[in-house]
Image: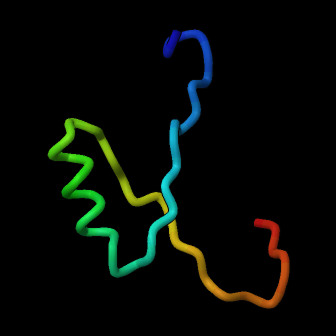
Amino acid sequence: MYKVFNMGIGMVLVVPKKEVSAMLKFLKQNKEKAFVIGEIVKGNGVKIV
């Protein structure tokens, strides 16, 4: 299926910045692949890039 369909990025977890290391460690211990894909920052409204 990965060769035919765009399978997306899968599940997304949103955790506080101070919890990122612990969460990555927890997921790795449970044999899950995990990556930091971004961060939420305060802004002035919608910005389209």
Q: How is the image coloured?
A: rainbow
Residue 10: x and y in percent read 52, 36
Asked if 45 appears above or below 19 in the picture, the reply is below
Left or right of 46: which side holds 30? left
Residue 15: x and y in percent read 45, 68
Left or right of 14: which side holds 45? right
Residue 37: x and y in percent read 47, 58
Of the 4 image quadrants, the one containing the C terminus is bottom right
Q: Quadrant of residue 21?
A: bottom left
Residue at the (26%, 48%) spot, across then down: 27
| Viewer-closest of 21 and 43 | 21
| Viewer-closest of 47 and 40 | 40
Residue 39: x and y in percent read 52, 72
| Viewer-closest of 12 and 7 | 12
Asked if 42 appears above or below 48 in the picture, the reply is below
Residue at the (58%, 33%) spot, across then down: 8
| Viewer-closest of 10 and 4 | 10
